[in-house]
């Protein structure tokens, strides 16, 4: 229920004191550091690491662009009722302190994407498939949670990202950097659309450096589990064992060793297969795959009991 994520967060703001005539100039912070927004990605995460990507840049008008890389381990509270056909929702909140109002905007011009959240799909190795990514901006308050107000909301559909996993191209290699598919997969943003939100002007006015009301950026993942592994390792073998146990129905009832041996073998095989099902955390409910395995075991046991009933009937 935990996953590690590394993401780059680029922030841009206007500081008139840093106006420059150059198209793009880097800031020298050897003598004096510039003001930066206070960014806190998921304070509840167990491990954090923050690295500066590069020096901050300034454009005419005092527009500052600053990027940092965050590596955090996020807890995702999952439910496994439909495992392995489950869908999970995981979120990463980013708190902004200091009385600054933050919103999601398009990434810097050097990133080849039209989405506010872009992913390198070939580096996202997981048992899940990213279905879509949702991004929000809202005002929250620990003292007055009833006044929470969402002032920005959007969703990026990641349909088509499967081609990034299926291709034989290694987009991290220099020979493939200019390939159109690699350009798409290295900055995959999907098709995004925004939603209408409430008027939060009254709550936004309450945001101050005291942090009684604070803005929060959040992005959420909707993850769909890949079940091809379970199809080959669980469903097909268990279904085959159940089908094999039904062969005993066409064996002569007088052939007791054959029918008994087949029945006992299928029962023991199902018990072994049940033990190989991927274990889950300590749960107080039954998963879908547990119901499937229990049903398969019940079928093979009934096939064995059927012969006992037939043998008893024929004998009497």
Image: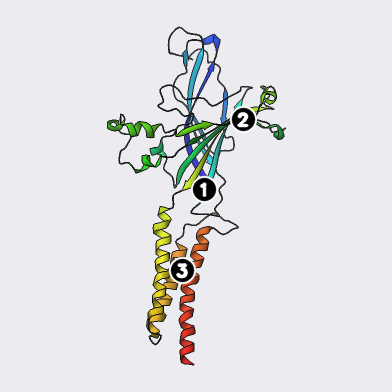
Tell how many labels. Answer: 3
Would you identify the image quadrant in which residue 150 lies? top right
Label 2 CA crowd tier, 10 Å (few <14, some 14–19, many 20+): few
Label 3 CA crowd tier, 10 Å (few <14, some 14–19, many 20+): some
What x and y, as percent, mark residue 33? 53, 15
Q: Which residue is at a point 49% across and 63% down the rendered structure image?
A: 292
Q: Secondary structure at mark 1?
A: strand
Q: Say above or below: 63 vs 126.
A: above
Q: Residue furthest bottom?
A: 316
Kindly tell me whether residue 27 is visible in this rendering: no
Q: Are marks 3 and 1 in contact (CB under 8 Å)?
A: no
* Residue that label 2 marks: 197
Q: Secondary structure at mark 2?
A: loop
Q: Are marks 3 and 2 in contact (CB under 8 Å)?
A: no
What x and y, as percent, mark residue 163? 36, 41
Q: Secondary structure at mark 3?
A: helix
Q: Which residue is at a point 43% across and 45% down the rendered structure image?
A: 126
Q: Say above or below: 234 vs 135.
A: below
Q: Which mark is residue 87?
A: 1
Q: Residue furthest top?
A: 21
Task: Tell which tag, 3 or 2, sits nearer the viewer.
Answer: 2
In the depicted view, which residue is nearer to us: 295 or 194?
194
In the depicted view, which residue is nearer to us: 261 or 248?
248
Q: Which mark is residue 271?
A: 3
Label 1 CA crowd tier, 10 Å (few <14, some 14–19, many 20+): many
What x and y, as percent, mark residue 258? 37, 81
* Residues at marks 3 and 2, CA–CA distance in whole angstroms: 53 Å
Would you identify the image quadrant in which residue 217 lies? top right
């Amino acid at each position: 229920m935990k996953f590690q994520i590394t993401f780059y967060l680029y922030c841009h703001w206007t500081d008139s004191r840093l106006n420059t005539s150059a198209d793009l100039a880097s800031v020298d912070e050897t003598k004096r550091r510039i003001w930066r927004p206070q960014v806190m990605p998921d304070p509840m995460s167990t491990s954090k690491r923050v690295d500066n990507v590069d020096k901050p840049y300034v454009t005419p008008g005092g527009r500052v662009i600053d990027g940092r890389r965050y590596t955090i381990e996020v807890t995702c509270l999952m439910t496994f009722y439909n495992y392995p056909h489950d869908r999970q929702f995981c979120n990463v909140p980013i708190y902004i302190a200091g009385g600054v109002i933050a919103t999601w905007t398009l990434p810097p011009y050097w990133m080849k994407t039209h989405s506010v959240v872009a992913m390198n799909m070939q580096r996202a190795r997981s048992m899940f498939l990213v279905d879509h990514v949702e991004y929000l901006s809202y005002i929250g308050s620990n003292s007055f949670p009833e006044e929470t107000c969402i002032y920005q909301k959007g969703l990026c559909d990641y349909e088509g990202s499967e081609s990034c996993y299926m291709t034989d191209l290694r987009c991290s290699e220099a020979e493939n950097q200019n390939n159109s598919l690699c350009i798409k997969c290295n900055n995959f943003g999907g098709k995004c659309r925004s939603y209408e939100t409430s008027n939060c002007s009254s709550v936004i006015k309450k945001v101050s450096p005291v942090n009684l009301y604070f803005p929060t950026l959040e992005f959420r993942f909707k993850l769909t589990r890949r079940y091809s592994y379970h199809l080959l390792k669980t469903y097909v073998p268990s279904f085959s064992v159940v089908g094999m146990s039904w062969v005993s129905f066409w064996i002569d009832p007088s052939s007791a060793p054959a029918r008994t041996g087949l029945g006992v073998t299928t029962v023991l095989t199902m018990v072994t297969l049940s033990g190989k099902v991927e274990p889950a955390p300590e749960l107080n409910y039954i998963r879908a795959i547990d119901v499937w395995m229990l049903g398969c075991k019940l079928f093979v046991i009934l096939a064995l009991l059927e012969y006992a009933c037939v043998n008893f009937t024929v004998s009497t």
